Amino acid sequence: MVLRVANCSGFYGDRLSAAREMVEGGPIDVLTGDWLAELTMLILAGNRLKGRPGYAPTFLRQLEDVLGPCLDKGIKIVTNAGGLDPVGCAEAVHELAGRLGLSPSIAHVAGDDLTGRPFPLVNADTGEHLTATPLTANAYLGGRPIAAALAAGADVVVTGRVTDAALVTGPGIWRYGWSADDLDPLAGSVVAGHVIECGCQATGGNYAFFQDVPDLAHCGFPLAELRADGSSVITKHPGTGGLVSVGTVTAQLVYELGGPRYLGPDVVARFDTITLTDDGPDRVLISGVRGEPPPGTVKVAVNYLGGYRNTMTLVLTGLDVAAKARVAQEALWARVPRESFDEVDVTLTDSGLLRITVMSADERLVGRAFSAAVVETGLASYPGFYGLSPPGNASPYGVYWPVLIPASEVHPRVFLDGKELPTPPTNALTTDDAAPAPGVTGAAHTPGTPSAQAADATATDATATDAAGAAGAAHAAGTTGAAHAGETASAQAASAAAADATAADATSAAGGANTEAAAGAAGAAHAAGTTGAAHAGETASAQAASAAAADATAMGAAADAVAVGAVPCDAAPASLPAPGRRDGVRRSSAPADGARPPGHPTATSATSATSATSATTTMPLGRIAGARSGDKGGNANLGVWTDTTARYDWLSAHLTPETLKNLLPALTPYRIDRHAFPNLKALNFVIHGLLGRGVAASPRMDPQAKALGEELRACLTNVPTHLAPPATPAAPPP
């Protein structure tokens, strides 16, 4: 017997017909959807200031199509579309049901909104103290309030800010009665929730090998067949487009990830214990996931108004593009001095777009005073001058500020049809008073302040994981690791405090920080209790501001510091056929607990074999590796995976933070942590500060770093010839 949990939304603005498609397309037990992201909370706050709903009204449009059929079929509906106003959203559902002549039991979960509550506003990434007044402050709740609502008979459960995975974990707790110490089943449900939370990204959407995906235009949404032991099968309804494969599931597993320990309010899921197995067409089994007690802290997503911004984009064509960019800027700054703005970002793209963004607390200064000055240069600037936007007013921007507070200070409340239910149970175990899960070794925990706990929980991860990868083991003894800060107690906190002291020895002249390589070179995991220095003095905005200025220097530095096996991105590739249908990527399974399959050579013998096979071929990295990237606060995550053990061994040895910076010189100014996942044949990189103060405040053309993975895959590198893909008649050379 399984619990079929379907997803019908991966973000606020996803396909409206998806709810109906999931209800009508096949049997499901629970219909869920994720409407919230860090940016969404800020958008909803802006809507509320304008007198609009503080929840996602598109949910009501979807619900209108399916509320009746769901009641008829006994399908429960669980949604985080309540956003900043779950009470208002629940009331709107009642009104909709009344218009439809229906009488569902409707619950809403509150207690996440901490706005106005006094608590230390210490940035979990940088250690800075916030002096501005928060616009929103929402704690990430877990799945138990959802389970309590379902147990009380709710047909529809509306929440505010919960972890994305809680939309699956909550129904799992309700159906199977998991207690706080059922750590492995809880962890398995978290992994399933992480896979389906982003909708079609689990079924072939945004997939690196998109040419393998049939009928992507009609991509079906995912569902998880969740079992009592926490294992699950990821699949989709028959007859829909898209693809569910080991490759598509791996791509989603490494999305918005930190280290192996994925922290949450219900459990810590060990992503280095996941096993993926082909279970038939469009079916992938997830099993073997181990869990640890949750941390003693909860992440709070704080947003505040940062000021005003404006952007103008000019097009540079023909000869002497760099000189034209200089002339354009000189003409502009002669009219509005550059130093009059709080922040300025200037980006010149390879395609000749000159993008100038200015920020200031003064709305007038960055409004038409700036954009009109750009237009005024139109007849006194470079030849071929034209822009992509007319002069416009400034727009406000928000700043994301992650905070950790003790879990004991967050009190979820559950209401059913307007009446409050008894307080839902909280987890009896946390890392303060419980040992790691059986079979998973963890560093000793030293109780302390929330920030100290976060630092302790993450200090050893980056160093330990490469020692594990090099040895071919699941993880090194003493690993405690950073986790996905995504939706819970934060791996971002980890990143600020994690392993800087040890990483310094591994930092390259170009500024790389391969923290795990330091451990690999030492041949042992980082000692328990080591925390290292935090980057408290270097703010994310300062990093972002320096990024554009450092680009030109980085380009030149990269040419002089190319790692072995890496080639500049403008080098000519060898003539090599591209791969066709990648059955290895689509259907291969991964070993449990990061272990090598039976008969696999050790890391040492693999290295010897690679040395013996010295012939290399210059080709885009993406011919043998997939990638997916995204945002998490001011940091970017870049997951890279491949399809065979031999390719993974080469990738793990080759793609260090230093090599990554050589391939993508724009990353040179930033600290990069790398985490190895041998069980998934994957690496994950966390680029600290790349997105400045978060998506809403980032001046980047790609503020969520969605394209970073594809930029990496397009870079040329020297790959051992025996690992290159075979020729296919239908595929042109790269």
Image (cartoon, grey):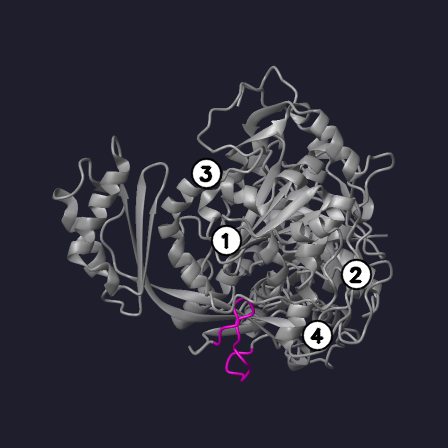
* CB within 8 Å, label 3 to label 1: no
Q: Which residue is mark 3?
A: 560
Q: Residues within 10 Å of mark 3 (few under 14, many from 20)?
A: few
Secondary-structure class at tag 3: helix
- Mark positioned earlier in the residue sequence (3 or 2): 2
- Mark positioned earlier in the residue sequence (3 or 1): 1
Q: Residue furthest top?
A: 729
Q: Please give the label number shown on residue 13.
A: 1
- Mark positioned earlier in the residue sequence (2 or 4): 2
Q: Residues within 10 Å of mark 4 (few under 14, many from 20)?
A: many
* CB within 8 Å, label 3 to label 4: no
Q: Which residue is mark 4?
A: 296
Residue range corresponding to the magenta coloring:
114-129
Comparing 408 with 537, the one in front is: 537
Task: Locate residue 447, reporting x and y percent.
Answer: 72, 77
Q: Which residue is mark 2?
A: 291
Q: Please give the label number shown on residue 107.
A: none
Task: Give amino acid for label 4.
Answer: Gly
Residue placed at 39% from the left, 56% from the top?
546
Measure how far apart labels 1 and 4 are at the Cα level: 34 Å
Residue placed at 66% from the left, 25% from the top?
614
Task: Locate residue 696, reporting x and y percent.
Answer: 43, 60
Task: Give amino acid for label 3.
Answer: Asp
Task: Locate residue 315, reporting x and y percent.
Answer: 27, 40
**Measured along the vertical axis of the image, is residue 255 above or below residue 419?**
above
Q: Main secondary structure of the magenta part?
A: loop
Front: mark 3 or 2: 3
Please check the rendered image and state whether residue 126 is part of the magenta-colored stretch, yes or no: yes
Measure how far apart labels 3 and 1 are at the Cα level: 45 Å
Front: mark 3 or 4: 3
